[in-house]
Image: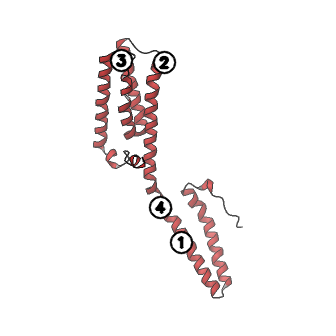
Amino acid sequence: MRDGLRRLPTSDRWTSRPARITVVLTAAILFAGCTALRWDLRGPADAVALLYSVPVALLALVFGARGGAASALGAVGSLVAWALATGTGPGPVGWAGRVVPLLLLGVLVGVLADRLRAHASAPAARVPQARRAVDAYDDLIQSLTVAKWSLESGQAEQALGIVTEAVERGRREQPALAREAGLERHWTAPGLN
């Protein structure tokens, strides 16, 4: 299942203009087919309104929550136009049964697609944060290594100065690194005063 989610339209192939035009044209053809069926069957109790979910979901996947909401509103508009033109239509419960699922489908699938795209692009955005964290860790290890050598050579005062400086530098840099990584509220400053 996880591999299936990775193949969701998150790459550049779905954001290119020709791909988006193809998706819009496909959805328009599907909407037209649903509308033609709607006019042909004419009964208010038919399930043709359910077929509108296919182009709504398609547009929501590619264009996100806004595209999903807009396509759901387009489908609802088509249903309203049919009801007004034919003079027949469902009652309030029937309208709710058609409108609410279409709107929920468009918005929820769109929100999911937006979040998956954001999640897929998040690792690339974290590379600079990871580099800064690795650099800070490397700096700390180097400082501690120099302090150890100073202790081994009998220079305790110099070792203490190096360790104190490394601790202070870490205390200054760590909150910014935690904030950049989104861990600010999970991190509490150690009680080194």
The residue pinned by badge 2 equals: 93
Q: Residue furthest bottom?
A: 153
Helix, strand or loop for disc 2: helix
Give 101 or 176, whichever is nearer the viewer: 101
Amino acid type of the residue tagged 1 in the rendering:
Asp
At a point 39% along the width and 12% down the height, the residue shown is 88
Helix, strand or loop for disc 4: helix
Instruction: Give the mark, 3 or 2, whose residue is nearer the N terminus.
Output: 3
Amino acid type of the residue tagged 3 in the rendering:
Trp
At a point 56% along the width and 76% down the height, the residue shown is 142
Q: Is residue 140 above or below residue 188?
A: below
For disc 3, the neighbor class at 10 Å (few under 14, some 14 to 19, many from 20) is: some
Helix, strand or loop for disc 3: helix
At a point 32% along the width and 17% down the height, the residue shown is 41
Image quadrant occupied by the C terminus: bottom right
Task: Tell me the tag on residue 138.
Answer: 1
Q: Is residue 175 above or below residue 162?
A: above
Location of residue 19 by image quarter = top left
Task: Tell me the tag on residue 128.
Answer: 4
Task: Measure the C-alpha gap from mark 4 to mark 2.
Answer: 53 Å
Instruction: Give the mark, 4 or 2, whose residue is nearer the N terminus.
Output: 2
The residue pinned by badge 3 equals: 82
Could you say where residue 87 lies in the image, as x and y percent from the top left? 37, 11
Contact (Cβ within 8 Å) of mark 1 with mark 4: no
Mark 3 or mark 2, which is nearer to you?
Answer: 2
Instruction: Give the mark, 3 or 4, whose residue is nearer the N terminus.
Output: 3
Instruction: Give the mark, 1 or 3, whose residue is nearer the N terminus.
Output: 3
Total marks shown come to 4
Task: Measure the C-alpha gap from mark 3 to mark 2.
Answer: 17 Å
